[in-house]
Image (cartoon, coloured by chain):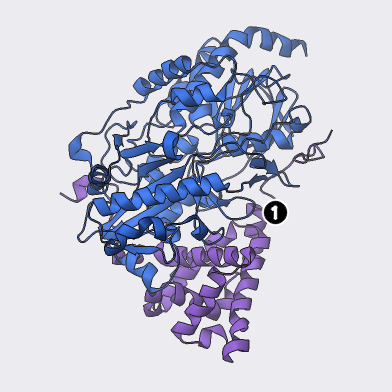
Chain colours: A purple, B blue
Amino acid sequence: MQGRNQVRSHRPIDPLSGGTGEARANASAGVLAPVRVTFRAVVETVIPEAAALDEQGWRDVEAIVEASLQTRPARLRRQLGLLLRLIAIVPVARYGRPFARLDAGRRSRVLGRLQDSPVFLLRRGFWGLRTLALMGYYARPSAAREIGYRAVPAGWEARR
Amino acid sequence: MIERAYDIVIVGSGAGGGTAARELAPLALAGRRVLLVEQGPRLRDEEFTGREIEMAASLYEDSGGFLTADGAMTLAFGRAYGGSTVVYTGTSLVAPERVIRGWAVPGLEHADVARRSAKYVVENNVHLLPPAAINDNNRLFVEGCTAAGFHAEQFPLNVRGCRGSSLCNLGCPNAAKLGTHRVQLPAAERDGVEVVTRAEAVRVEERAVVVRVRGRHPGEKGLPSEWEPGVYRVRAGIIVVAGGTVGSSALLLRSGFRTRLPRLGEGFTCHPAHILVAEHPGPITNDVGHPKSYFVDRAVDDGYVLETCMYFPFTTAKNLTGFGTDHSTFMRAFARLQMILVLACDRATRGNRIAVDRAGRPVVHYAFTPAVIESMVRATRASARIFFGAGALRVHAPTADPPVIEAAEAHGIDDRIEARHFRRGRTTVSAAHLMGGCGMGRDPADSVTDAWGRVHGVPWLRIADSSLFPDALQINPYLTVMALADRVAERIRADAGQLLEAAVRV
């Protein structure tokens, strides 16, 4: 009996095809470029300090996120783009303007509704977007310094 | 496809594969050709920088962001020369007698596991850190446990020359952690075991492994592979699969073994974990010193284990629930943060399993049972009491809503931390103790291998990693993985003559 878990053919399988390799090839254009305004507005809502970033700081944030997305399946990148477009336009019906043009309080309410949505897929989607925003911001060495993170290979010797 | 021939091929170089390589090295010394293939790269010492994102990308599968099928839990496992032993904290505990007895694997006795574990305690320089090396994050845990009525125990660790970088989970930058990449693998290579990195086992065939060797991308850390990029069929009289719970199960699944082994991929457990954070009034030493020095074992009574921990900025941020000012306030207090890792002792449960998708990639199905969620809630309540007992001002609890509990609210911990606040997709859950999928047991109806890692009905195929666990271990698993791999290697040494003669006849 053929189990559900089996691959039916015995052709050579490359688990990286459709994953890292394909992802690298397809990601050259970047995921964030078409949704940059909304993405930055989301990052500023998730991490209020991001509002103080200069253009170079934003480029650093986006480079970290893009690099991470390059190793992810194309499907996931498409879903991220879709979620950001959804976040951009959904507030129009309620507030009459897109997400990026809302004040901080309304932005928080929009994202809060996603975070607490009864629909698991929306909660999970926001969790993923939030994770990317946090990665882009806190993986920068300057952000680590600002929050007081000081770990270095020299360990105790560097503190004494 | 390029053809190669060896007597023994080992897949994977972590606690299981690295140990198997070391223990099979006498066969190499005796003239047998022994090969180990490892999917990840071999890093130079100077490439261990301690920088969060670049090290995660170099050392972990999916940069440490491998998700379960529903996306509700992150699984962290290593992918490098040394496997997960490169990125663990070196905690070295012997399997509890009750757990091995509970596994009820015919022929597997706790005394044997303990005896072999003791061998690796010596080999890996396992010892307790002296009091002077304990940082505030760990000291406060002990103080909080005393105040809250919990018994804290110190972790034995496998380090030599630890400088207290606190960067264990990003690969020790000081070569102090004695994983297989520092102890067993170099010894095996000195004795003639051949190691090929960046070499992924694609599938297992009759006495052969198909291996894809990939090139080194520009800018990627690590040495180039020892072999030219390409696809190889490596023939061998004995194949030892030790690619970790996910890797080993997926390899055998995409090789068609489920037909004869209905339990293949089943019995997955992982000790689902939350990272809890508390803020103290003043700075503490937390990002210096060994991060994981103490634990509280409440597995029997309450189904959880608490461990000290300290993570890096992004990992910490990801594990705090919510966003905005409350989230940032905790992050800005980093120098005042104490952390506790809570682990639920899950049990092998129908449906929690490893599968592969149509392309052969691993897919892990995991549902949080009510018992697991209750364990995490009990563990979180206990941790909150420990934090406040240690003098914390406020505690961040993922299973509270809102998640921040002030010291003045400490009397209401049980009301604030409740199972109903555990919401998939909102609450960050991660796991690093991945177990099962090729469990040991009596016969194919209940297991994949016997007590010596011999795959039922396939004498030339052995398993030697945490996928052998028929159920959760309820403690940190690496020493037990080494003990089991030691058993597997011992039996291979005994069987090698007969098996390799049979391979020649074939």
Amino acid on which the number 1 mark rests in the picture: Gly
User: Visible in this render: residue B246?
Assistant: yes
Asked which quadrant contains residue B297, the reply is top left
Query: In which quadrant of the rendered view does residue B127 lie?
Result: top left
Closest to the observer, B2 or A27: A27
Above or below, B296 against A84 in this view is above
Farthest residue in the bottom direction?
A96
Vertical arrangement, residue B114 with respect to residue B40, above or below: above
Q: Position of residue A29 (x, y in %)?
A: 62, 69
The residue lying toward the viewer, choosing from B441 and A84, is B441
Q: Residue furthest right?
A: A1
Q: Chain of mark 1?
A: A
Q: Nearer the viewer, residue B92 or B344?
A: B344
Give x and y (percent) for residue A89.
62, 83
| Helix, strand or loop under label 1 | loop
- Residue sitting at x 60%, y 50%: B68
Q: Quadrant of the N terminus of chain B?
A: top right
Q: Which residue is mark 1?
A: A18
Q: Where's residue B439, x and y in %?
A: 62, 28
| Horizontal and vertical percent position of residue A114 | 56, 72
Which residue sits at x=19%, y=36%? B131
